[in-house]
């Protein structure tokens, strides 16, 4: 597995997103043993960047990772997130990045993860009620105390990134980025590269759509959040199948799977990008990490880059209100 740097933080070229082990997708939370095997397999294959958040579950995702990483903590660049749980009474899905809330959040995450430090601590969503300077300062204090090693932001806009970075260096920004979600290319990437901040794309496989295995939403459980995602509904779904089929065609030509091609395209966009494809299965970790060895031709990269934008928004209206655009 190749390695790159997110700012000054050295990580594997491909990471592992743990969210689906307990949260959001069909089958989440049904097989802890397989989730732990998946983490162990990722480590065995050289994956070092593992991503979670207190909101996933909530809390249960961090707890599973804590159990999975027992005895292997030193092999991992461990990332988690704060700010989508208000510990002062608001509870889950309430934005709160106040310094007091961050203090409470970090202690809970450290305990659940079974560690004395978090390598990369992200603000999960920008809190409009707390100046980003206060949030950055609070994380900076945790870094000075040794409880956190590096500061990150998730789904933050250019101005917020600059303001936060001016208070304490931002190591990485996590944003949705894939063949069918490319808004970061014009708005975010130039700022990150100017400031030497790495990019960690989440949903690099389009929430599974780009794997070519999703042909109907009937495959989803009732509580799978994709059931009401605009890209997975109605005419949008049918239009987006054509994009998945184009990726499949390149995959056949390249002798790889569609997932590997989608990830290889993303890796070709720069050596400051470390995607975190999510999975709860060992077989998918094997497939995804092998993307690091897939070499697409210039013609194949150009063909993929010219695919039409996905039909539909990336989030529901309620979810979009928490994004900084």
Image: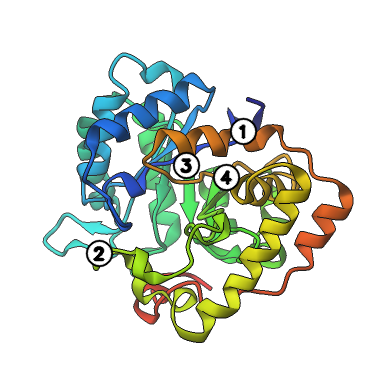
Name the residue carrying label 4.
275
**Residue 248 in the image, given as x and y percentages of width and height:** 67, 57
Name the residue carrying label 3.
151
- What label sits on residue 93 in the rendered view? 2
**Chain-order first, disc 4 or disc 3:** 3
Please indicate, yes or no, whether residue 182 appears anywhere in the rendered image. no
**Residue 270 in the image, given as x and y percentages of width and height:** 74, 45
Foreground tag (2 vs 4): 4
Report if the CB atoms under discs 1 and 3 are less than 8 Å apart.
no
Q: Distance between the residues labelled 1 and 2?
A: 35 Å
Foreground tag (1 vs 3): 1
Relative to 108, is 51 on the left or the right?
right
Name the residue carrying label 1.
290
Kind of element beneath mark 3 = strand
Dot 1, how many residues are within 10 Å of its Cα: few (below 14), some (14-19), or many (20+)? Answer: some
**Residue 319 in the image, given as x and y percentages of width and height:** 37, 73
Q: How far apart are marks 4 and 3 (CA)?
A: 17 Å
Q: Distance between the residues labelled 1 and 3?
A: 29 Å
Kind of element beneath mark 1 = helix
The front one of 214 and 168 is 214
**Residue 271 in the image, given as x and y percentages of width and height:** 73, 39
**Chain-order first, disc 4 or disc 1:** 4
**Chain-order first, disc 1 or disc 2:** 2
Please indicate, yes or no, whether residue 66 appears anywhere in the rendered image. yes
Q: Distance between the residues labelled 2 and 4?
A: 25 Å
- The answer to whether residue 67 is above or below residue 203 is above
Question: Residue at 64% of width from left, 38% of height from top?
Answer: 291
- The answer to whether residue 105 is above or below residue 217 is above
The front one of 182 and 168 is 182
Q: How far apart are marks 4 and 1 (CA)?
A: 13 Å
Question: Residue at 45% of width from left, 74% of height from top?
Answer: 232
């Amino acid at each position: 597995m190749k390695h790159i740097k997110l700012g000054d933080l050295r990580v594997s070229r491909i990471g592992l997103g743990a969210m689906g082990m307990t949260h959001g997708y069909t089958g989440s939370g049904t097989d802890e043993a397989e989730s732990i095997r998946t983490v162990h397999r990722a480590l065995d294959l050289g994956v070092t960047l593992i991503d979670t958040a207190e909101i996933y579950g909530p809390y249960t995702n961090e707890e599973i990772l804590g159990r999975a990483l027992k005895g292997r903590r030193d092999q991992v660049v461990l990332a988690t997130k704060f700010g989508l749980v208000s510990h002062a009474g608001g509870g889950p899905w309430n934005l709160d990045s106040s310094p007091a809330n961050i203090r409470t959040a970090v202690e809970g995450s450290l305990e659940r993860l079974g560690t004395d430090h978090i390598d990369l601590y992200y603000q999960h969503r920008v809190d409009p009620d707390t100046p980003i300077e206060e949030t950055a300062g609070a994380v900076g204090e945790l870094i000075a105390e040794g409880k956190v090693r590096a500061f990150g932001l998730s789904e933050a806009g250019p101005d917020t990134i600059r303001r936060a970075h001016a208070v304490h260096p931002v190591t990485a920004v996590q944003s949705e980025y894939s063949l069918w979600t490319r808004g970061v290319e014009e708005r975010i990437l130039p700022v990150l590269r100017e400031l030497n901040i790495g990019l960690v794309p989440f949903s690099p496989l389009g929430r599974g759509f780009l794997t070519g295995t999703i042909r109907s939403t009937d495959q989803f459980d009732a509580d799978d959040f994709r059931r009401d995602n605009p890209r997975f509904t109605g005419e949008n779904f049918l239009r987006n199948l054509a994009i998945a089929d184009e990726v499949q065609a390149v995959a056949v030509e390249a002798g790889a799977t569609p997932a590997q091609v989608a990830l290889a395209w993303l890796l070709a966009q720069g050596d400051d990008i470390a995607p975190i494809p999510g999975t709860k299965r060992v077989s998918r970790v094997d497939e995804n990490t092998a993307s690091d060895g897939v070499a697409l031709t210039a013609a194949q990269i150009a063909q993929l880059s010219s695919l039409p934008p996905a039909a539909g928004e990336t989030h529901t209206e309620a979810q979009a209100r928490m994004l900084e655009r």
